[in-house]
Image (tube, helix red, strand yellow):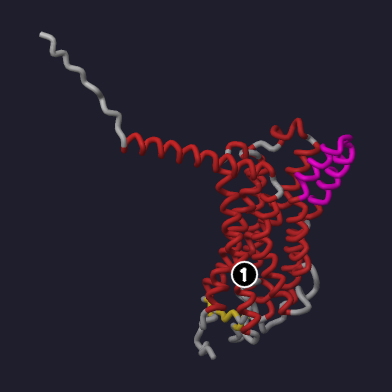
Amino acid sequence: MINDSYFGGFILLGFTGQPQMEMIISGVVFFFYIIALMGNIVIILLSFLDDHLQTPKYYFLRSLAILDLCYTTNIVPQMLVNIWGKDKRITFGGCAFQLFTDMVLSSVECILLAVMSYDRFNAICKPLHYMTIMNSQLCQGLVGTGWVVGVINCMILSPNAMSLPRCGNHHLDHFFCEMSAMIKIACVDTTAMEVTTFAMCLIIVLAPLLILVSYGFIAVAVLKIKSATGRQKAFGTCSSHLIVVSIFYGTVIYMYIQPGNSPNQNEGKLLSIFYSIVTPSMNPLIYTLRNKEFKGAIKRLIGKKKVLWKQQDTDSSSQKFPVQKCVLYNFNM
């Protein structure tokens, strides 16, 4: 039992009543977190180091990897500390920061996925003008717009959620400070807050309409391609993005765009773990394992390292066995 009479923060309950299930979930979360760290770091480094990946497509993919890296790091370490340790508490400031970061990053990712579909639309439907349309200023502006929308969404929802009266109840029935869990522990009528949350999430999640429109035009353009090889190549450039969009938006829409957010609290916890931890770890695998350009970048990077190692070996061998100079003296008088 935790003496929390004078504690001003929150207690993250998780699956406190099911310790075996909690330990299994923590092991799964830790496994996917390691994959997310390694995969997203590889994408970020390769997109910076390889000259062949300096294109709008990989600029957006690098932005997505940075988002996923920050998103999982915001949630997983605190979750594992609470599960593996005896202290389940989190400070009020820590909870506010976690909620703020969660809202911003998830909103930006929704916008970024829609922007990536617009990028694929221009790459397939307007290939001759692609680099002219998707110039660096436009790419940076689109990503910046996503961040502005995410911050505005967070500034509307997060302060209201943190300021709801709780009448001394600070037992948060979740793994981390999540919006729906914060609303449920309020001791006042939260109808207005729920309507506001629903409306803001609906505006953010309307981004799939842009994705559907973009892929509608893409499908028409692909069907006009006569060669089977061309159609397969065009489909290959979009299939990875479609898989990521389906997984991310499917869970988010099920979580938030329905009355009451979730019919079952335990189900809501598992779904939030899926879209906030499992999905960011799957994105690097989906984008890299099926991407020939990334495979080529890895081979080129490994080849450069081998060349550097050979040069170091030759330099070290020349230092160990220096060339001896032979000096000839003329003794003829």
State which region is magenta: 210-239
- Total numbered circles: 1
Q: Residue at x 60, y 54 (%)?
A: 40
Q: Position of residue 179 (x, y in %)?
A: 66, 71
| Most distant residue in the left direction | 333
Quarter occupied by residue 155 = bottom right
Asked if residue 224 lies in the magenta stretch, the reply is yes
Helix, strand or loop at label 1? It is helix
Q: Residue at x 55, y 47 (%)?
A: 45
Asked if residue 78 lies in the magenta stretch, the reply is no
Q: Position of residue 313 (x, y in %)?
A: 41, 39
Question: Which residue is the site of mark 1?
Answer: 29
Is residue 208 placed above or below 102 in the rendered structure?
above
Q: Nearer the viewer, residue 193 or 180?
A: 180
Is residue 93 placed above or below 73 in the rendered structure?
below
Q: Amino acid at mark 1?
A: Val
Quarter occupied by residue 312 = top left
Q: Residue at x 52, y 87 (%)?
A: 4
| Most distant residue in the top direction | 333
